[in-house]
Amino acid sequence: MSIIGTIVVGFIVGLLARALKPGDDRLGIIMTTVLGIAGAFIARYAGQAMGLYGANEPAGWIASVIGAVVLLFIFSMVRGRSRH
């Protein structure tokens, strides 16, 4: 997939993850895109570790969104600790 395609998919996955997780996350467009791309990478490597995906197989949409939601929860927990 091209770089532009990866960015677009990452943005869509990031938007879906932010819509599914309750609360105000205050992320901009760039951080939402990075969140989606990172979620897809986490889903891919976790899926490979569990034997769900092959070596060159990308993660699916649902797995990518789940990975991004997990990252969003971790980000919220870390940011919440630093504010106190």
Image (cartoon, rainbow, N blue to C red):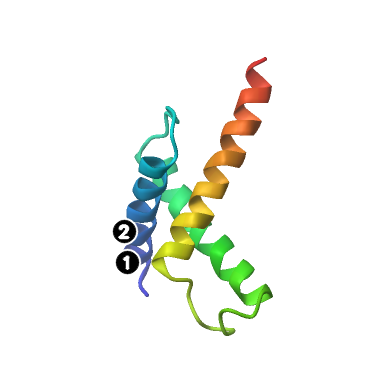
Q: Position of 76 compared to 64: left or right?
A: right
Q: Position of 26 compared to 84: left or right?
A: left
Q: How many marks can you see?
A: 2
**Residue bearing the label numbered 2:** 8
Residue 81 location, x and y as percent? 68, 24
Q: What residue lies at 36% left-to-right and 58% top-to-bottom?
A: 7
Report crowding for label 1: few under 14, some 14 to 19, many 20 or more residues within 10 A (C-alpha). Answer: few
Q: What residue lies at 35% left-to-right and 46% top-to-bottom?
A: 15
Residue 19 location, x and y as percent? 35, 42
Q: CB under 8 Å between callouts 2 and 1?
A: yes
Residue 8 location, x and y as percent? 31, 58
In which quadrant will I find the N terminus?
bottom left
Instruction: Please name the amino acid that badge 1 sits on.
Output: Gly
Disc 2 and disc 1: Cα gap in Å?
5 Å
In the image, residue 77 above or below residue 48: above
Q: Considering the numbered disc 1 on the image, is that residue within a helix, a strand or a loop?
A: helix
In front of the other: 41 or 76: 76
Q: Considering the numbered disc 2 on the image, is that residue within a helix, a strand or a loop?
A: helix
Residue 5 disc label: 1
Instruction: Please name the amino acid that badge 2 sits on.
Output: Val
Corner quadrant of residue 12? bottom left
Q: What residue lies at 35% left-to-right and 40% top-to-bottom?
A: 29
Residue 11 location, x and y as percent? 35, 52
